[in-house]
Each structure stands twice: as structure tokens, then as C-alpha cells.
């Protein structure tokens, strides 16, 4: 499964029934999003074998949990 961010929700469903458009966003992100941080962590783990934990800034190693808070990326 994958997730794709889109600027606006479609106005119709696949079955053709009209739906109300999504509410506008209250703000635009002003820095890295959660997705950006998770992807960067995955990439660092894959290339270097270790990364900074996106939860607590502790040390994560490939195949293991964060040494400080125990968070895992699976």
C-alpha cells in the first residue's frame, strides 16, 4: 500500500456520485513533514545502517529499535 498526497480531493467518487469538496487546509507545512522525516530515516538506515530517531532524536540502527525510546520502523 502507498499514500499519495494531492492538493485537492476529487469532487466525485469513482461511481460518479457527487460529493462535497474537502475543506481547505488551515496552513501549509513550513518545514519537513512527518512523511519527509520518516522517509529520510528509512533512507539513512538503508544506506548508512544507522539514523537519528524521528521521535526522540536517539540513535536507531538497521533492524533494531531506537536505543533511547524503543521506536521501530517496520
Image (tube, rainbow, N blue to C red):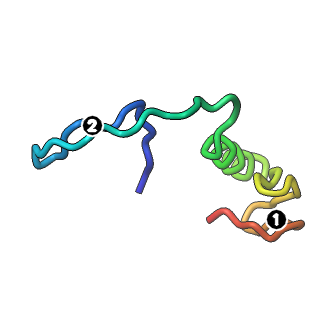
Residue tagged by mark 2? 10
The spot of residue 65 in percent (x, y) is 77, 68
Task: State the image coordinates of residue 36 (x, y, percent, origin top left).
Answer: 64, 40
Is 54 situated above or below 23?
A: below
In the image, taking residue 16 as reference, residue 24 lies left or right, namely right
Q: Is residue 74 left or right of residue 23?
A: right
Disc number lying in front (1 or 2): 2
Density class for disc 1 (Cα within 10 Å; few <14, some 14-19, many ≥20) is: many
Seen at 44% across and 33% down, the residue is 24
How dense is the environment of label 2, judged by Cα within 10 Å: few (below 14), some, or many (20 and up)? Answer: few
Q: Is residue 16 above or below residue 70?
A: above
Q: Position of residue 63 (x, y in %)?
A: 72, 67
Of 54 and 16, the residue lying toward us? 16
Front-most of 22 and 51? 22
Q: Nearer the viewer, residue 71 or 51?
A: 71
- Residue extending furthest toward the left: 16
Q: Quadrant of the C terminus?
A: bottom right
Q: Is residue 3 above or below residue 24?
A: below
Q: Is residue 63 left or right of residue 18?
A: right
- Kindly identify which numbered label has been placed on residue 33: none
User: Residue at 66% of width from left, 49% of height from top?
Assistant: 38
Which of the two residues, 34 or 11, is positioned nearer the viewer here? 11
CA gap, disc 1 and disc 2: 39 Å
**Helix, strand or loop status at disc 1:** loop
Residue at 58% x, 29% y is 28
Q: Residue at x 76, y 52 (%)?
A: 54
Mark 1 or mark 2: which comes first in sequence? Answer: 2
> Based on the displayed image, in which of its 4 quarters is residue 1 positioned?
bottom left
Q: Which mark is residue 66?
A: 1
Q: Position of residue 69 (x, y in %)?
A: 84, 68
Amino acid at each position: 500500500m502507498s499514500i499519495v498526497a494531492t492538493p485537492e480531493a476529487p469532487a466525485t467518487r469513482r461511481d460518479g456520485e457527487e460529493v462535497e469538496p474537502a475543506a481547505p487546509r488551515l496552513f501549509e507545512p513550513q518545514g519537513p513533514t512527518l512523511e519527509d522525516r520518516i522517509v529520510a530515516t528509512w533512507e539513512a538506515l538503508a544506506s548508512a545502517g544507522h539514523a537519528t530517531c524521528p521521535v526522540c532524536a536517539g540513535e536507531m540502527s538497521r533492524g533494531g529499535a531506537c536505543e533511547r525510546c524503543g521506536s521501530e520502523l517496520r
